[in-house]
Image: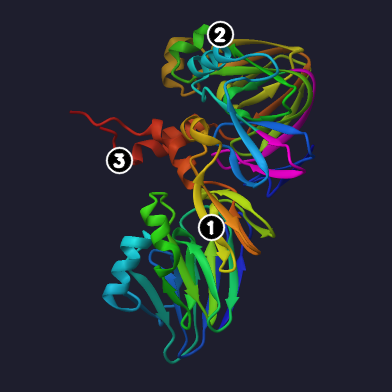
Amino acid sequence: MELQIDHGPAYSLAVCKLSQGESIRAESGAMVSQTANLRMETSSKMGKKGGLLKGLARKMLTGESFFMNVFHAEQGPGEVNLAPANVGDIKKHDLNGELFIQSTCYLASHPDIDIQTKVGGFKNWFGGKGFFMLKAIGNGPLLLSAFGAVHEMDLTKPFIIDTGHIVAFEPTLNFKIKRVGGWFSTFFSGEGFVCEFSGSGRLWIQTRNPTEFGTKVGPKLPPTK
Amino acid sequence: MQHKIDIKPEYAMLDVTLEPGEKLIAESGAMVGMDTHLDMKAQSRGGLLKGLKRKVMGGESFFQTTFSAKQEPGQVLIAPGSPGDIEEMVLAERQNLMLQSAAFLACTEGVTLDTKWGGAKGFFSGTGMFLLKATGPGTVWFSSFGAVRPIRIEEEYVVDTGHIVAFQETLDYSISKVGGLKGLLFSGEGLVARFKGTGTLWIQTRNPSSFAAFLQPFRPVEKS
């Protein structure tokens, strides 16, 4: 499997070259184009394990699609191009162990990687700004998508990140979901919920916050009935 | 006529200088700026009926804007509505280029635009894929949402209809779904165009419909 990111950082496209017998799992709706010899399988399985219940948990918790698509190169080598809905970059990560991923930032992964749904803490149910995470476990390449650019940070001191800017982080980091400065601030500062990290490890953030963008542009759209 | 595309690839803009007597036809609303002495006229190209057909079949603007230089040269700046790139193609006499209608940005005077070819296929299959046929001689400029990527097709190739920008007439296509019934209902992939033949296809790396779907939850709710 050869994964190449083109047209970055603004409008990245993941070009996934599969050898015969290989396959790749991708977020629902991410397929841009593909060679005709690939077979697409729609599945609620999110890894080697998993199945209906996991798919259901993902739908209920993250609001993401119940299903993912797996592209199989069965009759020879093939190619599939993948992209997220929003403008921004794609980051390739070679997973060796575990990684926490903000659910909207998952784009694709090697089929041997198991994707589990993790709740980011029930506190965030009140915030309206969902912060749900997936936990990727296994070995192999993984594709993360960002709204805006991806910025990599190696944390060695406690640090606070707005939940809307988190892309992914290593499990060596401890995290706590918190409100900033009491309820008043939560509602009026516009900062909502933040994630307080401690310990050391790598963190990837996105330079734009999808919720902030939606909040700016959304009111200009005609109202829904 | 002198022309160049600036600020490629993220926020490309077309910069054209017309010599006296020359004309540029652009998608309505695409003008960014122009010299004061240029003549600007909104018109339905090819008469009202052809324009109406384009509106109904092609989904693009009924009117196009024609810029012309009379006594002296003049400059006009043209940009598409979405963030993304602009590509240009020079068409020989009777050479055709198929364009997703929203991808049309501008053309020189000699180019004719028609929805006759294949437009009906998109229209009647309910795919929302409306095609224009641009016929030379002349230069046509088209725009993409995100980056534009040429793909050389030798055999069969599958593209999400929302990612098609343009393709050469040597390619034939049919609209289908991917992955069977389950795929259609649950894959989130919608409909795809299956291309056959040999030729170049240009795709855009972002899909306007997917982007609109992202914004949908942020729309205000109408108070009754």
Residue, disc 2: A121
Whether residue A8 appears in magenta in the rendering, the answer is: no
In the picture shown, does residue A97 fall above or below B118? above
Residue, disc 1: B173
Check the residue under mark 2 and report the chain it is in: A
- Decide: few, some or many residues near mark 1? Use Cα within 10 Å; few <14, some 14-19, many ≥20: some
Label 2 SS: loop
* The C terminus of chain A: image quadrant: top left
Check the residue under mark 1 and report the chain it is in: B
Q: Residue B172: x and y, percent?
A: 55, 62
Real-space Cα distance between discs 2 and 1?
48 Å
Q: Residue A10: x and y, percent?
A: 63, 46
Q: Are marks 1 and 3 on the same chain?
A: no
Q: Which residues are magenta?
A: A71-98
Q: Could one spot residue B30 in this view of the protein?
A: yes
Does residue B6 appear to the left or right of A189 in the view shown? right
Residue shown at the point (72%, 26%) measured from the top left: A111
Residue, disc 3: A222
Q: Amino acid at mark 3?
A: Pro
